[in-house]
Amino acid sequence: MSPIFPRGLLRELLGVVRLRDEDPLGGHPVSAPPVGAQAVATAREHSRPLHPPRPRSRAAAIRSLKLGLAPAARLLDATALALGLALLTALVHWWARPEILFLLLLGAVSLRLVVAPIVVPAFHPRRVLLTGVVAYALAFSFVTVSRHLTFLTHALDLGYYVQLTWNLAGGRGPRVSLPEMHAWGDHLSPIMYLFVPIFWVAPGPVVLLIAQSVALALGALAVFGIARRRLGDGRPAAAFAVLYLVNPSLHGINVRDFHAAALAIPLLLAAIYGAETRRPWMFVAAALLTLLCREDAALAVVGLGAWLAVGRRRWLPGALTAAAALAVLVVDIRWVIPWYRGAPYPHLGRYAHLGGSLGGILTGALRHPLAVLESVLTGGRLVYLLAMLAPLGFLPLLSPVDLLGALPALAQNLLSGDPILQHHRTQYQAFVLPFLIVAAIAGYARVARRSDRWPAAVLGVAMVASLALASRTVNNFALARWWPATEQRAAYGMLAGVPPAATVSAQDPYVPHLSLRALVFVFPVGIEKSDYVLLNVATYPWRSLPDVTMERDGQTVTIRVSPGREYRYAVAGEAGPHLSLRRLSSS
């Protein structure tokens, strides 16, 4: 039996942590009376004035403290119970945002643990690990699939990857129409070939969403293995696995659609575990698969090589890994992607303030270090770093050598002019998070070597910070979020009426449901070549599309797109606000 917060933080502050209550019957053991000359020596030794035993007064202080805090603990218990019931009712009937109630509940429970630690039974680390992995995979498969069924997924990126994989499975090559192009001309993600056999059997968005949730859950196995090897104890290793599973960045990456970059998280962790356990085949295989996720995943593999060389003093394999990954990055950006695109690599525009090419960006950063530092030390970027480090109790900062692996991907995010890269819940953190986890484990090891009091407390604080920043995830379990409303259910009949071979231009929420076809566009893109147009008339007029107007006359709808383009449609299906239009003519 062990308390969640051993010895209690409040007792730590009072300086009475290590004391125990006296035996109420006899106090301290008394030595046998001295005999003969020994009695004289003993009398001389104790000729000093005697003072009351201090342990007795401290023990009394402990008892009085416990009695004084008991009412506060009972009050916090009642508060937590009330907040828990309120949270359950909000999940069933949305009368308040569940995440707000969850934060209040988390605060009450945290304060309760500080006031009076709760003793819980010891658990076997492997059982905790396996329970966490299964629970995460099931919970996030449910969340992501239910979000899709309630039209909360998007053309980019779920619809994009569904169409890409469907084309690969059909032998049509890596083609997409979001926008219409060769997929390798945008992001190079050959890892999607791994999903082709699954699409032969069960094509569709649900497969990708479940696969992503399971893959991210399996990353906890590598975290546990790394931590157990570093710390020599399965209990903190299981704690780090759980800390990984509740990480807010992991949740954000998982919840918002599907991204090939997300698969790099378990792969990088597997590579690190392979390096830690001296399994070169595992390291090489995981590193190669990481490179297949996206072209910029090479930055993470450069960091992996730097970590292996500097952090583990394995200079040759680390240098070879970093050099090979850097070569892959240069080849992909300068030749491969431009060849498929027919134009230069498009995503360097985020760094135009530093330079127009990969070499120009590096040169610009080296020539103007103060300007780079000034841009990094801005409010938004500092908040981003805080949001990445707080869920790990800032432990990564205690191991700069292990943190080295995150620097290339962190630089990619911090130097970007696009603020989406500096949001802790986006897919751009997939190349950063694994190294932060490893650095946190190393930082914990340092704390544990210096003190046996603080490691558990630091993990407790990290857990609270993780749950607080991940509180938005709770909203996805509300009945209103995952149970399709009447209006949403009505849309499925309209979607079923669209022929599988038809070219479609649809508003964003419909696109992932229509991506198993050669051509699907986000309205009004592709309207000139689309057989069907799908709209939610409740969203009209479209504020983001002021030049697009719609006019209905009975069963005929006219859509005008500036300048001077006009398209006429017949109403093919209508269900609530959902409208399916079949093209008649254009002018």
Image (cartoon, rainbow, N blue to C red):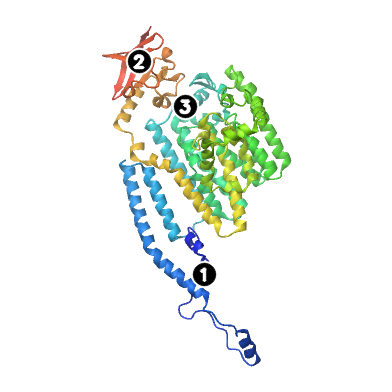
Determine which residue is flagged by label 1: 19
Q: Percent x, y for residue 221?
A: 55, 46
Question: Among all residues in the image, which is located at the extreme right?
Answer: 316
| Residue 156 marker | 3
Q: Identify the residue at horizontal 67%, vertical 42% (top origin).
A: 308
The secondary structure type at the circle numbered 1 is loop
Q: Nearer the viewer, mark 2 or mark 3?
A: 2
| 172, 181: nearer the viewer | 181
Mark with earlier residue (1, 3): 1
Mark with earlier residue (1, 2): 1
Please give left or right for residue 565 compared with residue 245 in the image: left
Instruction: Work out whether 29 lies above or below 267.
Output: below
Say whether residue 131 is visible: no
| 444, 359: nearer the viewer | 359
Crowdedness near tag 1: few (<14), some (14–19) or many (≥20) residues, C-alpha within 10 Å: few
Please give left or right for residue 237 compared with residue 112 in the image: right
Q: Percent x, y for residue 34?
A: 60, 89
Mark with earlier residue (2, 3): 3
| Residue 549 marker | 2
Q: Identify the residue at horizontal 71%, vertical 39% (top origin).
A: 317
Q: Percent x, y for residue 483?
A: 34, 36
